[in-house]
C-alpha cells in the first residue's frame, strides 16, 4: 500500500463545524458547482455514500466506513480500478479555525504506479481544495 497526501488547507471555521458538515455526504450539494464538468458527471449522494461518474472510469462510489468525531472521516472507493481508502483529517487551528488534509492509501501494482501516482495526487489536491472552499 502506498500513501498519498494533499497539502494542508486552512479553513476559517472551527473543527466541529467543519466535521459536522463533512460527515454527512448529503452536504456535497455545495460542491456540485465546483467540480469540472468534463472530469466528473452525475454526482448522487446519501448520508453515507456518494457516487460520481468519472469518464473514462465510469461510476465510482465512495462510502463512509468510519467517523472519528470531530477529527476524521474515513472512506473507501468501490468501483474504482484500484483499491483505494482515504480519509479527511480535520485539526483545530485555534478556536475559530481549522486545518484540513486528505490522505489516501492505494494498492497500486508496480507496473501501473508511474501512470496512476500523478493523477491520484492531483485528485487529492483538488478534493482538498474543493473542501476548503465550502461555506461551513
Image (cartoon, rainbow, N blue to C red):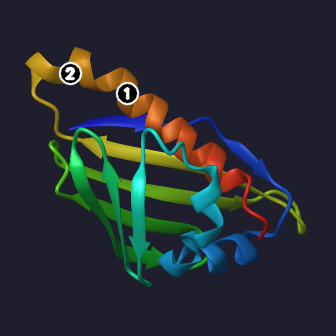
Question: Residue 8: horizontal and vertical position, in percent?
Answer: 66, 41
The answer to which image quadrant residue 106 occupies is top left
Residue at 16%, 56% in the rendered image: 79
In depth, the one of 124 and 2 nearer the eye is: 124
- Tag in front: 2 or 1: 1
In depth, the one of 26 and 10 nearer the eye is: 26
Question: Residue 97: horizontal and vertical position, in percent?
Answer: 85, 61
Relative vertical location of residue 123 with respect to residue 48 in this rendering, above or below: above
Mark 1 residue element:
helix
Q: Check the picture and name the quadrant holding the C terminus.
A: bottom right
Residue at 48%, 40% in the rendered image: 124
The answer to which image quadrant residue 121 occupies is top left
Relative vertical location of residue 67 with respect to residue 125 in this rendering, above or below: below
Q: Which mark is residue 100?
A: none
In depth, the one of 26 and 67 nearer the eye is: 26
Q: Check the picture and name the quadrant holding the N terminus.
A: top left
Horizontally, is 71 left or right of 109 in the view? Answer: right
Is the residue marked by circle 1 packed among few (<14), some (14-19), or many (20+) residues within 10 Å? few
Relative vertical location of residue 24 with respect to residue 29 in this rendering, above or below: below
Horizontally, is 91 left or right of 88 in the view? Answer: right
Residue located beneath label 2 in the image? 113
Earlier in the chain: of badge 2 and badge 1, it is: 2
Question: Residue 66: horizontal and vertical position, in percent?
Answer: 37, 75
Is the residue marked by circle 2 packed among few (<14), some (14-19), or many (20+) residues within 10 Å? some
Q: Which mark is residue 119?
A: 1
Residue at 55%, 36% in the rendered image: 125
**Residue at the far bottom in the pictured view:** 47
Q: CA distance from mark 2 to mark 1?
A: 10 Å
Mark 2 residue element:
helix
Residue at 17%, 48% in the rendered image: 83
Amino acid at each position: 500500500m502506498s500513501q498519498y497526501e494533499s497539502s494542508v488547507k486552512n479553513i476559517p471555521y472551527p473543527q466541529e463545524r467543519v466535521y459536522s458538515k463533512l460527515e454527512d455526504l448529503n452536504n456535497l450539494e455545495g460542491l456540485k458547482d465546483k467540480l469540472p464538468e468534463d472530469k466528473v458527471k452525475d454526482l448522487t449522494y446519501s448520508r453515507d455514500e456518494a457516487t460520481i461518474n468519472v469518464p473514462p472510469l465510469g461510476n465510482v462510489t465512495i462510502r463512509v466506513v468510519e467517523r472519528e468525531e470531530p477529527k476524521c472521516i474515513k472512506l473507501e472507493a468501490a468501483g474504482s480500478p484500484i483499491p483505494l481508502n482515504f480519509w479527511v483529517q480535520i485539526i483545530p487551528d485555534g478556536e475559530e479555525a481549522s486545518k484540513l488534509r486528505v490522505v489516501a492509501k492505494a494498492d497500486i501494482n508496480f507496473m501501473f504506479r508511474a501512470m496512476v501516482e500523478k493523477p491520484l495526487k492531483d485528485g487529492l489536491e483538488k478534493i482538498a481544495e474543493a473542501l476548503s472552499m465550502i461555506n461551513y
